[in-house]
Amino acid sequence: MLHTQQYAQPFETPPYGNGRGIRVYFIHILVGKTETGVAANESGSRPPDVEERGRTVGRPRRAMIPSREVLLVEDNPGDVRLVREAFEATDGDHELHAVPTGEDALRFLERRAENGDEALPDLVLLDLNLPGTDGGAVLERIRESPELRRLPVIVLTSSEASGDVEACYRRAANAYLTKPIAPDDLVSMIRSVETFWFDHVRLPPQ
């Protein structure tokens, strides 16, 4: 059985504003021989922004989730680097696979599909302007395949042509995003996609 002991030690903050200080209690919790502390006010509750052992108490934290796999189909090395940096800067645990052509993407997905739905990536980021088989054809092949058709695909391209937008949604793309020109804006977009797709979107069961 784990035994704990708790006691409070008050101290006064320096006067400020109206000249009054705030009495703050530093609550010590003894667990065996280990002592930890958490600041509290007189009511015994902890303020929302108190730092406890290097982390913030009272702020929402992302729950621990299994690693997410993302397939990036992109032939521009600079964009691949920016997308990778954006995912690395998030709180999530991700594994990014990058392939430069549509043929490579289809081979990757078909190999994964041989091992069942759980082997498929959680998300595909698909450029349209690819050498050989372009992104539109890749999307069409994905939607025609019984093993791949439910795969979430977000088109990420430099094209702003309304015809491309219409064609991708006609082929059941989950979203169409136009790459911003500034590198920092692309990083910001990818981080927004990561938060939206993995934290908020709900998909039907496999």
Image: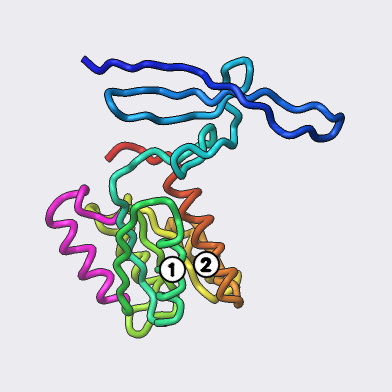
Q: Helix, strand, or loop for circle 2?
A: helix
Q: Say which quadrant the C terminus sits in.
A: top left
Q: Say which quadrant the N terminus sits in.
A: top left
Quarter occupied by residue 153: bottom left
Q: Helix, strand, or loop for circle 1?
A: helix
Decide if residue 94 is on the left or right side of residue 10. Answer: left
- Give the CA distance from mark 1 to mark 2: 7 Å
Residue beneath disc 2: 187
Give x and y (percent) for residue 67.
29, 50
Q: What amino acid type is highlighted by mark number 1?
A: Glu
Q: Are marks 1 and 2 in contact (CB under 8 Å)?
A: yes
Q: Earlier in the sequence, mark 1 or mark 2?
A: 1
Residue beneath disc 1: 85
Q: Is 149 inside the magenta-drawn segment? A: no
Give x and y (percent) for residue 20.
80, 26
- Mark seen at residue 141: none
Give x and y (percent) for residue 77.
40, 82
The residues colored magenta run 102-121
> Foreground: 10 or 110?
10
The residue depicted at 45 percent of the width and 49 percent of the height is: 197
Decide if residue 161 is on the left or right side of residue 80. Answer: right
> Foreground: 1 or 36?
36
The residue depicted at 19 percent of the width and 53 percent of the height is: 119
Give x and y (percent) for residue 12.
67, 27
The residue depicted at 21 percent of the width and 49 percent of the height is: 117
> Foreground: 30 or 75?
30
Q: What amino acid type is highlighted by mark number 2?
A: Val
Decide if residue 130 is on the left or right side of residue 180. Answer: left
The residue depicted at 63 percent of the width and 25 percent of the height is: 24
